[in-house]
C-alpha cells in the first residue's frame, strides 16, 4: 500500500483524519490480528482499543464511534485516527484494495438472498475447487464474514496462501445493527467486488427491525443487480420476487433460471438440464426442498461457467454441508441440527425433517435472544405452522447458560414466543437451560424418532453439549 496515505484514505471514505498524514504499510485488519503497519477498521473504539493498536504499531485506526478518551489517547500516542460516519465505506475501500492487489483478474461470484446463500456459496466453492480452481470463499458455518461491518473479507483475501483463480463471496442481503440499517449494503458490497456472476436465492423476511416488509427486503436484495456489469445473473424461477428481478438486468448480461419450470429443474429421478440427467436422485446427499433449491442454484452457476457436468455431479454427490446446515449428528435416533432462524427457513426445515421421521418429531427450538419481540413472534408462528398436523413434541429453550449478554433472551421475548404456542393450542415444554432441554429430549425420544435442533446463537453449542452428555452416541 505504498501509494496510500492516511489523508488519502480519509478522503476516500468521507472520513475525518485526526493526526499526521503518513504512508500506510500493511493490510486492512481487525484489532486482534493486526500487525505493524496495518490499518485497523473497527466499528467502535475506546481508550483500551487505542492503546492496544498503538502497542501493535499499526499505521492508523478507522472507526465510526470513538469515546472522547479514545480520541485523547490517540493524540497522545501520535496514532493517526480516521472517523467515518459510515464504517461500511471504509470496509468497502479495504475490500476493493485487497481485490486489486491480491485477486485482480480472478473469476468473481456473488451469492445473496434471504435463505440458502451460505449453502449455495459453499457448494459453488466446492465445485470450482474440484474443477481445479484455487478458490476463496468467505462462507463459514455462522455466516459471520458476509458483511461490510468489519474488514474480514479484505483480510482473508490478503492472507490467502498462494495465487487465487476464483472467489465465491456470500453477501448479506440486509445488514446493520440495532435499528440502524446499512442502506444498500448488498449493492455496495457487490459493486465493490465487481463480479462476473450474481446468484440470487430467494426473498423472504428476516432482520426485522432493519427491514419491516417484503417490499423492503426486495429492494435491498435487488440492489445486487442494479448497475451489474458482469456476464451472468442466476435467478430462482420458483420465487416470484426473484424471477421479477430479471427485468432489472441489463441487456449485456445473460439471465439463467433454475427451479421448476426452467431448463434446469428437479423431478423424479434427479436434476435435469433440458431433459438431460445431470445428477441422479440417489447421488444427492439430501433431498429436502430447500437443499435441492440450493443445489440447483449451484449447478446452474457451474454450468454457466462451462464446468463439465461430470465434475459437477462428482462434487455434489460427495458434498459435506456446512455445520448447522441440516447437519446429521446421529442416526439412532436421527438428530438433525439446523441454523433455521427466520420464518421460511423454520417452516421448510421442520417439514423436511417430518418426512424423514419414522416416529415422533422432537423439535428443540432456541428463542432468539436480544433480537426483539417481532422476530420472535414471526419465528414462533412459523414453528406453529410447520408443526401443524405433525406428530411432535415441542421443547423451547432460552439457552441461558450458553449465551452471552448480546444473545440473552429477554422476558418479553420468551413471553411473545410462548404466547403464540398458547394461542395455537400447542403443548410445549420450556427449559431455561439448553442442556436441560437436550437431556429431556434424549430421555423421552426413541430410536425411531427424529430430533430437530433449530435456532441461531442459542442452539450453536448444542452439538458439543450432546457430545459431552452422550459420548457413545457420537463415536
Image (tube, rainbow, N blue to C red):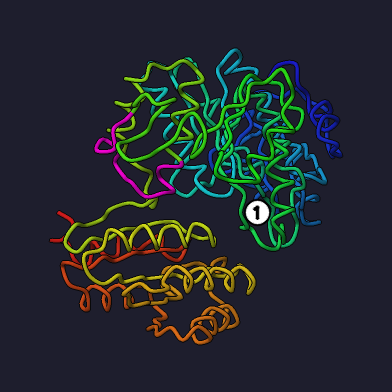
Locate residue 133, reporting x and y percent: 42, 17
Residue 97 lies in magenta, yes or no?
A: no
User: Which residue is painted at 49% across and 16% down in the image?
Assistant: 165
Q: Is residue 407 above or below residue 13?
A: below
Locate residue 443, reporting x and y percent: 20, 77
Query: In the displayed structure, does residue 159 sit left or right of residue 243?
Result: left
Find numbered disc 1 in the image and state the secondary structure of the residue it sits on.
helix
Residue projecting furthest to the top: 105
Q: Is residue 459 above or below residue 20?
A: below
The foreground one among 379 and 472 is 379
The foreground one among 292 and 55 is 292
Residue, disc 1: 48
Q: Which residue range is magenta in the image?
A: 279-293
User: Which residue is painted at 48% across and 15% down in the image?
Assistant: 163
Residue 292 lies in magenta, yes or no?
A: yes
Answer with the quarter of the image where residue 151 lies.
top right
Work out which quarter of the rendered image holds the N terminus and state it: top right
Q: Is residue 77 above or below residue 165?
A: below
Work out which quarter of the rendered image holds the C terminus and state it: bottom left
Q: How many marks?
A: 1
Query: In the displayed structure, does residue 39 sit left or right of residue 421?
Result: right
User: Which residue is painted at 75% across and 32% down in the image?
Assistant: 226
The foreground one among 183 and 196 is 196
Locate residue 348, reporting x and y percent: 45, 57
Crowd around label 1: few <14 · some 14–19 · many ≥20 (10 Å):
few
Locate residue 468, reporting x and y percent: 23, 64
Amino acid at each position: 500500500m505504498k501509494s496510500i496515505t492516511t489523508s488519502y484514505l480519509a478522503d476516500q471514505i468521507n472520513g475525518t483524519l485526526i493526526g499526521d498524514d503518513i504512508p500506510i504499510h500493511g493490510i486492512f485488519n481487525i484489532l486482534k490480528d493486526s500487525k505493524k503497519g496495518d490499518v485497523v477498521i473497527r466499528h467502535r473504539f475506546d481508550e483500551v482499543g487505542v492503546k492496544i493498536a498503538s502497542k501493535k504499531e499499526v499505521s492508523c485506526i478507522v472507526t465510526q464511534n470513538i469515546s472522547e478518551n479514545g480520541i485523547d489517547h490517540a493524540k497522545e500516542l501520535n496514532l493517526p485516527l480516521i472517523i467515518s460516519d459510515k464504517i461500511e465505506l471504509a470496509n468497502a475501500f479495504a475490500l476493493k484494495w485487497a481485490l486489486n492487489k491480491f485477486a485482480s483478474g480472478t473469476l468473481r461470484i456473488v451469492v445473496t438472498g434471504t435463505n440458502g446463500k451460505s449453502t449455495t456459496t459453499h457448494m459453488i466453492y466446492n465445485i470450482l475447487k474440484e474443477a481445479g480452481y484455487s478458490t476463496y470463499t468467505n462462507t463459514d458455518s455462522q455466516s459471520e464474514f458476509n458483511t461490510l461491518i468489519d474488514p474480514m473479507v479484505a483480510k482473508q483475501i490478503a492472507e490467502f496462501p498462494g495465487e487465487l483463480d476464483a472467489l465465491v463471496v456470500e453477501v448479506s442481503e440486509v445488514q446493520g445493527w440495532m435499528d440502524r440499517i446499512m442502506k444498500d449494503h448488498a449493492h455496495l458490497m457487490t459493486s465493490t467486488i465487481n463480479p462476473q456472476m450474481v446468484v440470487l436465492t430467494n426473498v423472504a423476511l428476516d432482520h426485522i427491525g432493519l427491514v419491516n416488509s417484503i417490499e423492503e427486503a426486495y429492494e435491498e436484495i435487488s440492489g445486487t443487480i442494479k448497475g451489474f456489469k458482469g456476464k451472468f445473473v442466476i435467478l430462482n424461477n420458483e420465487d416470484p420476487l426473484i424471477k421479477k428481478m430479471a427485468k432489472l438486468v441489463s441487456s449485456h448480461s445473460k439471465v439463467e433460471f433454475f427451479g421448476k419450470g426452467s431448463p434446469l429443474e428437479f423431478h423424479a429421478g434427479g436434476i435435469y438440464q433440458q431433459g438431460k440427467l445431470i445428477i441422479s436422485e440417489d447421488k444427492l446427499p439430501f433431498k429436502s426442498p430447500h437443499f435441492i433449491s440450493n443445489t440447483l442454484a449451484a449447478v446452474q452457476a457451474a454450468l454457466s461457467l462451462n464446468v463439465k457436468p461430470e465434475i459437477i455431479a462428482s462434487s455434489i454427490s460427495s458434498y459435506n454441508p456446512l455445520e448447522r446446515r441440516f447437519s446429521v449428528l446421529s442416526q439412532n435416533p436421527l438428530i438433525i441440527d439446523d441454523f433455521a432462524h427466520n420464518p421460511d427457513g423454520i417452516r421448510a426445515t421442520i417439514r423436511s425433517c417430518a418426512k424423514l421421521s419414522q416416529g415422533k418429531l422432537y423439535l428443540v427450538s432456541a428463542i432468539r435472544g436480544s433480537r426483539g419481540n417481532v422476530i420472535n413472534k414471526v419465528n414462533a408462528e412459523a414453528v406453529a405452522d410447520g408443526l401443524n398436523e405433525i406428530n411432535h413434541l415441542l421443547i423451547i429453550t432460552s439457552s441461558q447458560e450458553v449465551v452471552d449478554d448480546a444473545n440473552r433472551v429477554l422476558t418479553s421475548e420468551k413471553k411473545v414466543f410462548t404466547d403464540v404456542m398458547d394461542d395455537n393450542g400447542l403443548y410445549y415444554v420450556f427449559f431455561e437451560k439448553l442442556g436441560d432441554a437436550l437431556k429431556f429430549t434424549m430421555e423421552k425420544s426413541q430410536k425411531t424418532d427424529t430430533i430437530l435442533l433449530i435456532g441461531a446463537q442459542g442452539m450453536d453449542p448444542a452439538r458439543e453439549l450432546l457430545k459431552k452428555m452422550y459420548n457413545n452416541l457420537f463415536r
